[in-house]
Image (cartoon, helix red, strand yellow):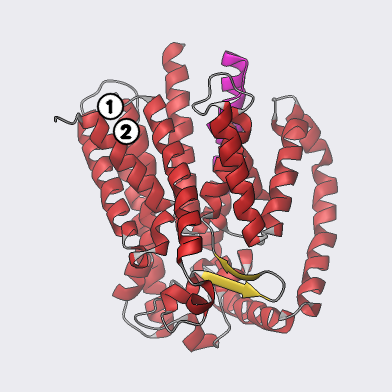
Amino acid sequence: MKISIKTLITIGLVIAFFAGLQGGKYFLKNRLQELGLLIAIGLYIYAAFQTAFISKKIKWNWWVFIPPFISLFIIVSYSFAFAINANTVVFPSIFASREFLWIFVAPAVYLLYCAGYELERIEKAFALALIISLFNYLFHYYRIDLEAAYFSDDAFLHSLVTHDEWRGYRLKPPTVSLVVLFLYSLMSLFSPKASLNVFGSLLFLGLCGFVYSLVAARAIAASLALSIFLYPIFFSRPSRLNLLITVLPVFVFALYFIMGYVVAHFETADGGDVRMASYKIAWENVLTHFIMGYGQSSGYSKTYQQIFGGKFFPSDLGLIGMAFKYGIVGICLYVYFNFYIFFRLIKANWIFRKLHKRHNPLIWALLIFSTITTINLLLIPTLAFGQGITFGAFSIAYTSCYLSKWADIK
């Protein structure tokens, strides 16, 4: 049986999306991530050659050279920063930073579209990866002995499970894929041309809800509800941005008191003294490593815990932890791309609604999730990790495909 090149590309995209959204972390110590990265980079190279001589105005040099420059700059510079600050070797940190190679998803997807790969296939490949992530999580939730994994001597297996007194042992979910799938299924119920039918939409809505009843992720649920609530008020059409600009000073004023409450909560909550001690360590190092931060550690050289204490995890410290690792340069890059993705999705959503008189379920789902990352900007740097990088890269490419398509129509 002969398999077409488009079918192979579709299979490759599904694997790359699934691996990038960390669906493979529950088996073989996430070795699927390496396969997904190889596929993403391979698709990027293939698409770059396919589009090299196309006369369309696709900014070929921008899409081919800028993404690898950004990813390699982050990987190499912050690995060297850690090697210098911790007085250790650099190569383990380079390997530990490989998640930033998911940036290649952006040029791979966009250049494939420019080479003639249909946008509808890209949408279905991404949706299929979300669905596989859901069933994959449910399978491993019941396969893995969560208590044994939590107390395992295997650091990787231990990292998959979290525990507290009232929620018990919980397998960490692929948050990005589950939230986006929930939103995609929700809007598909109201879209007559969605890929999912009513039965499929209700099934995935129910299963995603069931997963979050298992993990009791209150912060994500609250952010999700707030983002859906804010969409029709501020982001559904261009005129609503005027209202956002009007209330923005009030929001900033309220944020000051909210942050004060958050700090007070950390100080009084269980383990709050540990968290505040970590913030203090991070902030002191931000002041002494202001430009590039302390850098990216590695379990194969030195860890942050070996240097700053066993309970110091900068990834749990929000934007302060980001500043500790990546300095003011990293913070600026992060904030820029967070809002760049957010406003591109807003623009794509407006144009799609204007042209088609309905929502595109996937654009809307990506927009609402981007709203969640923006609301949690100070506390949860989602876009700095594998799932978030894949989400951001796909969002940039996906909106670029649509903007290119609409430009051709004009």
Q: Which amino acid type is marked by label 1?
A: Ala
Most extreme residue toward the top, as rendered? 410
- Give the residue displayed 61% in from the left and 16% down from the top: 354
**Image quarter hosting the N terminus:** top left
Q: Is residue 409 above or below residue 172?
A: above
**355 magenta-colored:** yes
**402 magenta-colored:** no
Which region of the structure is painted magenta?
Answer: 338-362
Query: Which residue in the protein does label 1 denote?
Result: 115
Which mark identifies residue 111?
Answer: 2
Residue 376 x, y percent position in the rendering? 67, 55
- Give the residue displayed 66% in from the left and 62% down from the top: 379
- The reply to whether callout 1 and callout 2 are in contact (CB within 8 Å) is yes
Whether residue 127 is visible: yes
- Closer to us: 344 or 27: 27
Q: In this view, does 317 lie to the left or right of 27?
A: right
Most extreme residue toward the left, as rendered? 1
Q: What element carries label 2?
A: helix
The image quadrant of residue 191 is top right
- Closer to us: 129 or 391: 129
Distance in Å between CA atoms under marks 1 and 2: 6 Å
- Closer to us: 64 or 21: 21
Residue 147 x, y percent position in the rendering? 54, 77
Q: Is residue 345 above or below residue 250?
A: above
Q: Which amino acid type is marked by label 2?
A: Leu
Residue 328 x, y percent position in the rendering? 55, 63
Q: What element carries label 1?
A: loop
- Give the residue displayed 53% in from the left and 75% down from the top: 289
| Mark 1, other Cα within 10 Å: few <14 / some 14–19 / many ≥20 | some
Q: Is residue 278 left or right of residue 9?
A: right
Q: Is residue 74 above or below residue 40?
A: below
